[in-house]
Amino acid sequence: LKHLEKRRVAGYSRVFIGRDLRASSPQIADDCAIAVQSAGLVPVDCGVLPTPALALHAMAEGGPAIMVTGSHIPADRNGLKFYTPQGEISKEDELGILGALVSAAVAGGVAMPEDGFAAAEDRYRQRYRHFLAPSTLDRWTVGVFEHSSVARDHLCSLLHRAGATVVRLGRTETFVPVDTEAVSDAIYAPRDDWLVRHRLHAIVSTDGDGDRPLVIDANGDFVRGDVIGLMAARYLGADTVVTPVTSNSGIETLGAFRDVLRTKVGSPHVIFGMEEVAHTGGVVVGFEANGGTLLGTDVTVNGARLERLPTRDAILPILCVLATAARAGNSIARVVSELPLRAALSDRLQQVPVERCAAFAARLGAEPAFAKDFFDGIGDVQGISVIDGPRVTLAGGDIVHYRPSGNAPELRCYVEGATPERAHVLLAWGLEAAAKRVRD
């Protein structure tokens, strides 16, 4: 709030607060409400809801918002996502917020927030209510891996409305840190049993705060996030796509979009990119490699109009993927296989020292001799991009990209190969080789 005051953002009297299902989130949300109230403003409790739902409601009401969530990171950690009245904060806003931090204690007491839960939930539900026609998913049986996702009830309701038979799976009231990109996690082990037992055409889910999608096809294979985002952009009729450098390198070769702009990893960078190209006209869609999809412009699909929402959303791309396959009369696996993209995989090393990951990535990107020696035996280095972490292109077009996580002690590894088998080899090698450098 001090940062917004310094930026001379005015005209609001209410601050909207939402949260995920972490055990610590209610108390942190209460603390935020007390701080808002002590600043002379009115806190509005929007309860447990998806991050994009909170953002949508706050923007429509013209106020800033605070989402209490640690996203996909372990349950014993938490965090805050901030929104100005205009939407998601920028990198410049991040620096301003950090600079406005003060050590003085906020007066205690009990907050008396307004109740905004029903209004915020309903606005998000109405956004997608007519996006898919009631018969779109007839004859589809879709499993919803509910776990502790705050988007689970919305997802089930919308899929049912679109004609699908919905099977609810794995619901828990205890928070589970689901990382939609860590496909090797044990939490996904039941998927093959679920697919067979319920004769599912797909399993869908989101991360804990509902801004990263998960789609598993009928074969039990994960659809990569960048492929989910790509399919969403095509379904939405995008003219320009904005996506980070970690998304599949084949997106430009599809010929499906007028322009493709690459950015650093992170929704603030994607949003900045969308703003840069907004003047070019047409539909602008952004997506991250995790599949979270952002609308930079209004769009009308099948007579349903969606207003721009420049923050990550998980439900929109899930609906787009299912509708694409249903419209084509194909399985999701068949639709994905027909995309001319290189085989790509990603995973991460967990609990690795942040400073070692940073030093390793910096050296790999800055020292050609070190990179040549590191990759000896797996391929000859042809080029290195350092837009966001060292993205190394090897002979034959293979790609190995390392990126230290921005919010956890993890080192991400993204690879692309000519075949799925080659991609698996690259990923296994990439994780093992990096572990030797960054672990004790």
Image (tube, grey):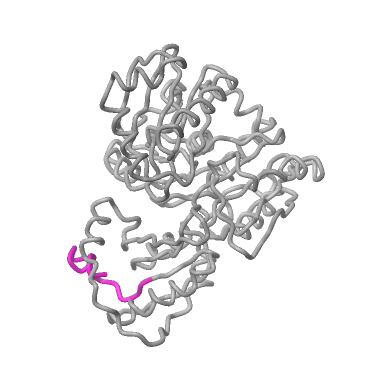
235 or 90: nearer the eye?
90
Q: In this view, does 280 lie above or below 145?
A: above
The answer to which of 277 and 372 lies nearer the viewer is 372
Q: Where the C terminus falls, by quadrant?
A: top left
Percent of width and height locating residue 430? 47, 28
User: Which stretch did the figure color magenta?
Assistant: 1-15
Is residue 190 part of the magenta span, yes or no? no
What is the number of callouts on the image?
0
Quarter of the rendering containing residue 3: bottom left
In the rendered image of this protein, does residue 164 appear above or below residue 386?
below
Q: Where is residue 251 in the image (x, y as percent from the top left)?
A: 44, 26
Which residue occupies 26% across, 24% down? 367
| Residue 96 location, quadrant | bottom left
Q: Residue at x 57, y 57 (%)?
A: 151
Q: Is residue 251 left or right of residue 144?
A: left
Residue 7 in magenta stretch: yes
- In the rendered image, residue 208, in percent from the top left (x then y), is placed at 54, 56
Between 409 and 301, the one nearer to me in the picture: 409
Q: Which of 142 and 285 is in front in this view?
A: 142
Left or right of 186: which side holds 255?
left
Q: Which residue is the extreme one toward the right?
A: 197
Give x and y (percent) for residue 411: 43, 39
Q: Which residue is drawn at 29% across and 80% down?
A: 106
Q: In which quarter of the image is the N terminus?
A: bottom left
Residue furthest to the front: 440
Write the residue at 52% across / 38% down: 225
